Image: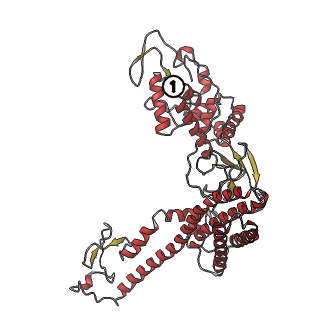
Amino acid sequence: MNSEDGFSDEDHGDSHRSVPSHSPSCLSCSNWDSDEDTCTEIALPEGPNHNVAPDDFVYKVLSVDQIVQHQRNIIDEVNNVLNLSPQVTRTILNHFKWDKERLFENYFESSPQEFFQRAHVLNPFEQENASPAEAVGSPASTKKKHCGICFCACDELKGLGCGHSYCVACWKQYLANKTCSEGLTHTITCPAANCDILVDYASFLALADDPDVVERYKQLITNTFVECNTLMRWCPAPNCTHAIEANYLEPKAVQCKCGHQFCFGCGENWHEPASCGCLKEWLKKCLEDSETSNWIAQNTKECPKCQVTIEKDGGCNHMVCKNPSCRYDFCWVCLGSWEPHGSSWYSCNRYDEEESKQARLAQQRYRSTMARYLHYYNRYANHMQSMRMEHKLYANVQAKMDDMQAEISWIEVQFLRDAVDALCQCRSTLMYSYVFAFYLKNNNQKLIFEYNQRDLEMATEKISECLEREITAKNVYDIKQKVLDLSHYCQKRRHVLLSHVREGNEKDWWEYIEDAATQGH
C-alpha cells in the first residue's frame, strides 16, 4: 500500500487467539487431564478410546499460533518462486483458496496482467515502476483534498494503489463495517464504485487502526484459512480454538486436546456405525420436532392426489385441497373422489370402491412410515438424553474418588473413571446405531445387527444403573469387580456390534432404503 505514512510490507503480523465459527453442540466425554498447548501428532492407537483400527491415517492438533505459522510458511514457499511482497502473496493465495499448485499453474499459464487482474490485485511489477507523483496517498499539492466518501476537506487522504483515496475516519468506519458487521476479510475491496481492487493484509492493519477490529479481522483470516484447507477442521467443541490437520480426508475419528472426539469427514460428533451421508439425511429429517410429526400423524390426512397434508377444520366431509396446483375434491371419510358421492354427503357409502381402497392403502403406508420413523427417533433421542445426563457422572465420580483418597490410593479407584468412559462410548454407539438401522432394509444381517444392538443396550443399562446407584466409599472394594466386569462386557459387545458393521461394509451386506444413506462409507 502506498501512503505518506509508509505502510509496512511485512505481512506476518502477531499471533492471536481465534474463535472459530462452528457448532456449539458437544456430546464428547470430559477431558480428565490438561496438556500444554502444543502441536500433537497422533496415529490412531488400538484400544477403547478410538473407534477405528490403526492405519496410515495420521493427524495433528494445532493451536491458533501454529495455524498462523502455517500460513506464513505457505506464503514464504510461494514467495520463493514468485518473488512477490508478502501482502500480495497472501491476497493471491486467498483468491486461490490457499491452493499453491493451482496458483502456480495459473501464474505460469497466464500473462502477469491477466493473472493479477483475475486475483483483483494491482500488478506489482508495474507498481514498482510507478513514479512517486503517481503513488496514491502522496500529496500532489499543498492544497486540502476532499474525501471521496464524506467530501470533507482533509490535509491527507489514504488509499490503495488504484488511485481512489479517502480520509482516515471513513476508512476506519468502512473496514469496521465490512469486518464486524458483514464478516468479510480477503474479499474487502476499495470503497470506490466499480473498483474491485482488494484491501491487502498490511493495508488493513494500517487503515483500521482499531485493536478490536484488527483482532476480529485476524480471527476471520484464520477461520478462512482453515475452511479453505480440505485437510484441516476446527474442533466443534464449545470454546475450543484448536484445529485438526490430517494427511488425507476420510470419515475417521479424531480427538482434540480438549477431549472432544469427532468425525474428520463431516465434522459432526463421532457417529459410528452410521455413515456421514446417513447422519446428514437423518439430521435433516429430525429438523421437524417429533411431537409435531406425531400430532400430524394423528390429526391430519394426505390429499389422495398430491399427498399434501390437510387438517380438517369443520364438520363437512367434502374436502378441497388448497394446493393451487391440485384443488382435488375428495371425501374425508373414504378419501375417494367427491364427484360420485352425489347427495350422500353425510352418509358415505363408498368404502368398497377401488379408488377408496387405494387411498386408504396410501394413508396406511404413510402412517406406517411415520410410526417407523418415530420408533427409531425415540430411541435415538432417548440415548442422546441419557448420554447428556450421564456426563454429569464425571463430576459425581470425581467427587467420590476425592472422598475415597483418605482410605484408598488414587490408582485403586481409576476403574471408576474408566467405567464412565466406557459408558459414554457405548451410549454414543447406541445412539448412532439407530440412525444406521433406520436406513437399513430387512435381511438376515440386519437381524444379527439388531441382536447385537439389543445385547449392547442391556449391558449399557446395567453399568449405568450400577454407577449411578450402587457405588459408595464403603463398598468400593466389594463393587470394584462388578464394575470391571460390566465395563469389560460393554466394551466387548460394542466391539462386536461395530466389527459386524465394518465387515458388512467391506462385504456389501447392507442394503439401504435411500441412496443418500450410503454416502460416507
Q: From the viewer's side, name the closer residue of 435 and 513.
A: 435
Horizontal side of 344 relative to 35 (left or right) equals: left
Asked whether residue 226 is in view, the answer is: yes
In this rendering, the answer to whether 18 lies above or below 314 is above
In this rendering, the answer to whether 449 lies above or below 252 is below
Image quarter of the C terminus: bottom right
In this rendering, the answer to whether 386 lies above or below 189 is below
In this rendering, the answer to whether 313 lies above or below 62 is below
In the image, residue 199 lies at what x, y percent? 54, 30
Specify how the rendered protein is coloured.
secondary structure
Quarter occupied by residue 192: top left
**Residue plotted at (50% across, 36% down):** 179
Q: Residues within 10 Å of mark 1 (few under 14, many from 20)?
A: some
**Residue plotted at (31% across, 79% down):** 332
In the image, residue 44 lies at what x, y percent? 75, 57
Q: Which residue is mark 1?
A: 162
Horizontal side of 178 relative to 351 (left or right) equals: right
In this view, the residue farthest toward the left is 343
